[in-house]
């Protein structure tokens, strides 16, 4: 993709691997700028990968703009079988221009550069109804906190207090940064309990958070799934 000049950001499981939140992911999930010039570049990259669309909806900007994911399977010998899923709009996630501004760029062992969603944007994108996303989301924030807690910044502290999902670490962060924790506790019940040191209450609050996010994601996807069903019906 990079050799074609496509503007995209790696997300999903492979981005979690880079951040230490997962060990392996074969499929490739991309946040893609849905402008016509960028989509033309992406189509050229798909041609080189011998990638074919494998499911509805069609690869058209209108579907990307409404929040659909579009799915491809690569046939090139060097990428045979790899699935590529692209999205441009995600629930609760900033527009692409902002995602691009705060992206993380990582250099691979081969010397290539890979642009990823920032860890905070990746965490937000993982707040779905899928069971597999929540353990990964928790690991992402835990790893970030443990790797950077000796180099706190205001932005990092707010991120940790807003997103940590391991009770013992949230209690630790609240004790280290009580002023910020009190401010965040106004909008996050789990942090209010972290200030009291009540792990059991934190776990209950975190479970409530997860239920709300899963339900919000189900509501978000309901009309999109209905549209896919209509497309399948029309194709038959």
Image (tube, grey):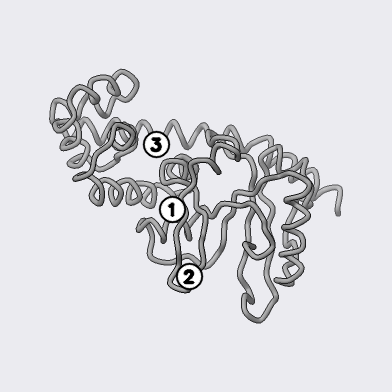
Q: Which residue shows up at 56% across the image and 36% down it?
A: 91
Determine which quarter of the picture holds residue 30.
bottom right
Give the mark, 2 or 3, whose residue is nearer the N terminus. Answer: 2
**How far apart are the alpha carbons under marks 2 and 1?**
31 Å
Give the mark, 1 or 3, whose residue is nearer the N terminus. Answer: 1
Tag 3 residue: 210
**How far apart are the alpha carbons under marks 1 and 3?**
13 Å
Residue 227 is left or right of residue 156, and the answer is right
What SS does tag 3 mark?
helix
Label 1 crowd bin: few (<14), some (14–19), many (20+), radius 10 Å? few
Q: Toward the viewer: 69 or 131?
A: 69
Q: Residue furthest front?
A: 111
What SS does tag 2 mark?
loop
Tag 2 residue: 111
- Image marks 2 and 3: residues in contact by CB distance under 8 Å: no
**How far apart are the alpha carbons under marks 2 and 3?**
38 Å
Label 2 crowd bin: few (<14), some (14–19), many (20+), radius 10 Å? few
Q: Residue furthest bottom?
A: 77
Residue 168 is left or right of residue 217, and the answer is left
Q: Which image quarter holds the C terminus? A: bottom right
What SS does tag 1 mark?
loop
Percent from the top left, x then y, of residue 151?
Answer: 23, 43
Q: Which residue shows up at 51% across the image and 62% down it?
A: 113
Tag 1 residue: 132
Q: Which residue shows up at 82% across the image and 48% down it?
A: 233
């Amino acid at each position: 993709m990079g050799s074609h000049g496509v503007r995209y950001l790696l997300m999903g499981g492979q981005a979690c691997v880079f951040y230490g939140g997962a060990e392996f992911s074969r499929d490739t999930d991309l946040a893609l700028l849905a402008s016509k010039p960028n989509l033309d570049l992406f189509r050229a990259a798909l041609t080189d990968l011998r990638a074919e669309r494998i499911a509805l909806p069609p690869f058209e900007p209108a579907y990307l703009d409404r929040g659909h994911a579009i799915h491809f399977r690569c046939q090139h010998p060097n990428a045979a079988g790899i699935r590529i899923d692209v999205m441009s709009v995600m629930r609760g996630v900033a527009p692409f221009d902002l995602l691009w501004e705060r992206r993380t760029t990582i250099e691979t062992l081969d010397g290539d550069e890979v642009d990823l969603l920032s860890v905070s944007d990746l965490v937000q994108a993982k707040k779905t109804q899928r069971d597999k996303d929540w353990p990964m989301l928790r690991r992402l924030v835990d790893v970030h906190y443990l790797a950077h807690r000796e180099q706190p910044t205001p932005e990092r502290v707010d991120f940790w207090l807003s997103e940590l999902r391991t009770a013992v670490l949230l209690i630790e962060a609240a004790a280290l940064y009580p002023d910020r924790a009190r401010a965040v506790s106004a909008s996050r019940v789990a942090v209010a309990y972290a200030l009291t040191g009540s792990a059991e209450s934190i776990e209950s609050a975190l479970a409530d958070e997860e239920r709300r996010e899963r339900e919000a994601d189900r509501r978000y996807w309901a009309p999109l799934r209905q549209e896919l069903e209509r497309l399948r019906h029309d194709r038959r």
